[in-house]
Amino acid sequence: MPSSPTLARLCRVRDLIRDCHAESLRLIDCATEIDLSPWHLLRSFRAVFGETPHEYLTRVRVERAS
């Protein structure tokens, strides 16, 4: 489990993806937003939320379209 500050940043990125699901989001942009490398964001996001940022984005888009 990541540290508390990292967890807070991951939650911030998750919220950003959820709130901006209709926009073009890139992993590098999300990583820059929370000051993590793209690889660290990808690995940490998957460990905490059980899916990659892209999988989460796709799921949010499908849920919103239903």
Image (cartoon, grey):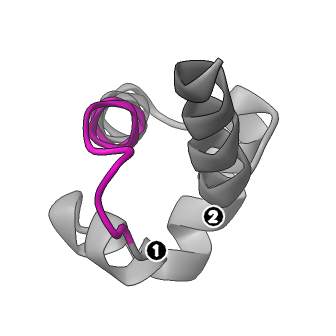
Q: Is residue 60 above or below residue 20?
A: above
Is residue 37 shown left or right of residue 66? left
Q: Is 30 situated above or below 61?
A: below
**Which residue type does callout 1 highlight?**
Leu
- Which residue corresponds to mark 1? 27
Q: Can residue 32 be seen in this view?
A: yes
| Proximity of marks 1 and 2: CB atoms separated by less than 8 Å | yes
Q: What stretch is highlighted in magenta?
A: 12-25
What is the tally of numbered marks visible in this picture? 2
In the image, farthest residue toward the right? 50
Q: Which residue is drawn at 49% across and 78% down?
A: 38
Task: Identify the mark nearer the N-term, 1 or 2.
Answer: 1
Specify whether 56 is left or right of 25. Answer: right
Q: Is residue 17 magenta?
A: yes
Residue 32: give x, y in percent of width and height.
23, 74
Queried whether the magenta region covers residue 58, the answer comes back as: no
Graded by Cα atoms within 10 Å as few (under 14), some (14 to 19) or many (20 or more), the crowding at tag 1 reads: some
| Residue 23 position within the rendered picture, expressed as x and y whole percent measured from the top left | 29, 59
The residue labelled by disc 2 is: 42
Q: Is mark 2 on a helix, strand or loop?
A: helix
Label number found at residue 38: none
